[in-house]
Image (cartoon, grey):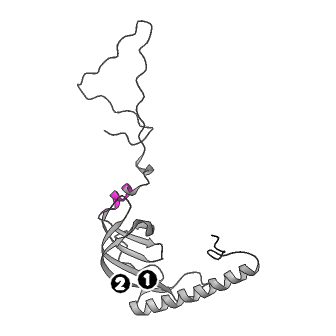
């Protein structure tokens, strides 16, 4: 039996097995046994080894560029590069007002098949509950991919203009935006 937690006692001796008795010390009690190496709980592993539990499960990945991929994890390596099977890219476009309490929108899926994702591009990943997999996201309806893609690109362009104006206002107040400083050689 393995000890996975530090607070667990060491395993009992095998039944019927002979235990070796420490040699008797004529000056007093026997010396204490050597300390057992402490084992770390499985939650402590922060490497690609955590992906072992997610192999052959359906995952949702969010990439650094904002794309959302859904697929079955088939393989991975020490750099957390992932191979996904039956991969679809899901895009979203909101159609509700920005200050409305519940978001409403459209979503569409584009089939990619086998997909290799470089580990450093994964921002977030999580297992999908297969009982809720077929349900659309709350507040969103399925629509044609081309329409949702066009709507999503328009929203991203509008957001980019808004961000550019915000950075200009901050620059007039003496603040620098990201990547706006002078390059010193």
Horizontal side, residue 139 vs residue 133: left or right: right
- Please tell me how crowded label 2 is: few (under 14), some (14-19), or many (20+) other residues with Cα within 10 Å: some
Q: Which residue is situated farthest in the left direction here?
A: 16
Q: Which residues are magenta?
A: 49-56
- Where is residue 117 drawn, in percent x and y? 37, 70
In the depicted structure, whether residue 42 falls above or below residue 34: below
The local secondary structure at tag 2 comes to strand
| Image quarter in which the N terminus is found | top left
In the depicted structure, whether residue 17 falls above or below residue 99: above
Q: Main secondary structure of the magenta part?
A: helix
Residue drawn at point x = 49 percent, y = 88 percent = 152
| Image quarter in which the C terminus is found | bottom right
Confirm or deny contact between disc 2 and disc 1 (CB under 8 A): yes
For mark 1, what is the residue? 91
**Image-quadrant location for residue 165:** bottom right
Q: How far, Cα to Cα, is label 2 from label 1? A: 8 Å
- Where is residue 73 drawn, in percent x and y? 32, 67
Sequence-wise, which precedes: disc 2 or disc 1?
Answer: 1
For mark 2, what is the residue? 110
The local secondary structure at tag 1 comes to strand
Q: Which residue is situated farthest in the right direction here?
A: 173
Residue drawn at point x = 40 percent, y = 65 percent = 119
Residue 97 in sight: no
Dot label at residue 19 = none
Q: Which residue is situated farthest in the front direction here?
A: 185
């Amino acid at each position: 039996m393995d000890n996975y937690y530090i607070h667990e006692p060491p395993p009992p001796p095998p039944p019927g097995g002979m235990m070796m008795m420490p040699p008797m010390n004529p000056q007093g009690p026997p010396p204490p046994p050597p300390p057992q190496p402490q084992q770390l709980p499985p939650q402590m592993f922060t490497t690609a080894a955590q992906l072992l539990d997610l192999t052959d499960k359906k995952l949702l990945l969010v990439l650094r560029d904002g794309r959302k991929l859904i697929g079955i994890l088939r393989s991975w390596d020490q750099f957390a590069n992932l191979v996904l099977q039956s991969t679809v890219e899901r895009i979203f476009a909101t159609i509700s007002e920005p200050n409305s309490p519940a978001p409403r929108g459209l979503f569409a899926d584009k089939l990619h098949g086998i997909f290799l994702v470089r580990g450093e591009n994964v921002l977030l990943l999580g297992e999908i509950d297969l009982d809720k997999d077929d349900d659309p996201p709350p507040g969103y309806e399925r629509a044609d991919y081309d329409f949702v893609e066009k709507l999503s690109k328009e929203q991203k362009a509008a957001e980019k203009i808004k961000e550019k104006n915000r950075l200009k206002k901050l620059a007039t107040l003496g603040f620098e935006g990201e990547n706006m400083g002078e390059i010193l050689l």
